[in-house]
Amino acid sequence: MATKSKENRIVIALACTECKERNYSTMKNRKNDPERMTLRKYCPRCRCHREHRETK
């Protein structure tokens, strides 16, 4: 049985917007952030900082 504090937190994968490779995984609160999350992270394949978007 899941604890009450972890019900709204889900694990998501972040993919690079240029090469579409899934490089990072993180958690987000479904209640506070209902839309897709976008973060600027380092992509090892492109070798530069790019926008990473939440994937399904």
Image: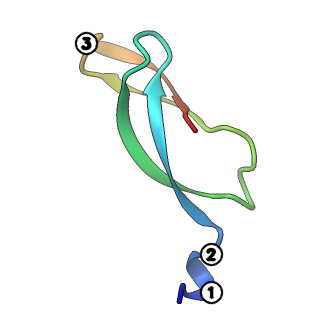
Q: Is residue 38 above or below residue 1?
A: above
> Which picture quadrant has residue 56?
top right
Q: Which residue is mark 3?
A: 47
Q: Is residue 21 above or below residue 4?
A: above
Residue at horizontal 40%, vertical 11%? 19
Secondary-structure class at tag 1? helix
The three-letter amino acid code for the residue at tag 2 is: Glu
Question: Which color scheme does this rendered protein use?
Answer: rainbow
Label 2 crowding class (10 Å Cα cut-off): few <14, some 14-19, many 20+? few
55 or 28, which lies in front?
55
Secondary-structure class at tag 3? loop
User: Disc 3 or 1, which lies upstream in sequence?
Assistant: 1
Q: Tell me, for residue 4, which label it has, or none.
A: 1
Q: Real-space Cα distance between discs 3 and 1? A: 40 Å
Find residue 26 and report its horizontal and vertical position in percent.
Answer: 44, 50
User: Disc 2 or 3, which lies upstream in sequence?
Assistant: 2
Give left or right: position of 19 versus 48: right
In front of the other: label 3 or label 1? Answer: 1
Residue at horizontal 55%, vertical 60%? 10
Secondary-structure class at tag 2? loop
